[in-house]
Image (spheres, helix red, strand yellow):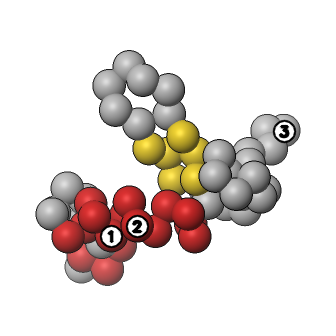
């Protein structure tokens, strides 16, 4: 069993972590609270689609 902690706040992540990284650089695993700004940026510039759009 793998226990994942947020790289910023060090809290245990429940569910799936938000993974952020560029190229070959090390990746950061973040909880939903700490990764919210990254997700908002990616959705705003349409790099990812929202969950609601995927279900339609």
Q: Which residue lies furthest to the left in this view?
A: 45
Label placed on residue 40:
1
Residue at x 54% of width, y 40% of height: 28
Q: Is disc 3 placed on a helix, strand or loop?
A: loop
User: Disc 3 designates what residue?
Assistant: 1
The outermost residue toward the top is 24
Quadrant position of the C terminus in the picture:
bottom left
- Residue wearing tag 2: 37
For image coordinates 38% across by 60% down, the residue present is 38
Count residues near mark 1 (Cα–Cα under 10 Å), then give few for <14, some for 14-19, many for 20+.
few
The answer to whether the residues at label 1 and label 2 have Cβ atoms under 8 Å apart is yes
- For numbered disc 2, what is the local secondary structure? helix
Question: Residue 15 appears at what percent x and percent y?
Answer: 67, 60
Report the residue at 44% width, 44% height from top.
20
Element under label 1? helix
- Where 25 falls versus 34 (above or below)? above
Sequence-first disc among 2 and 3: 3
Quadrant in which the N terminus appears: top right
Judge the density around disc 2: few (<14), some (14-19), many (≥20) Cα neighbours within 10 Å: few
């Amino acid at each position: 069993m793998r226990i994942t902690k947020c790289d910023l706040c060090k809290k245990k992540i429940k569910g799936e972590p938000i993974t952020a990284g560029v190229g070959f650089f090390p990746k950061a695993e973040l909880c939903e609270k700490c990764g919210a700004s990254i997700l908002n940026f990616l959705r705003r510039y349409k790099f990812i689609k929202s969950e609601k759009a995927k279900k339609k």
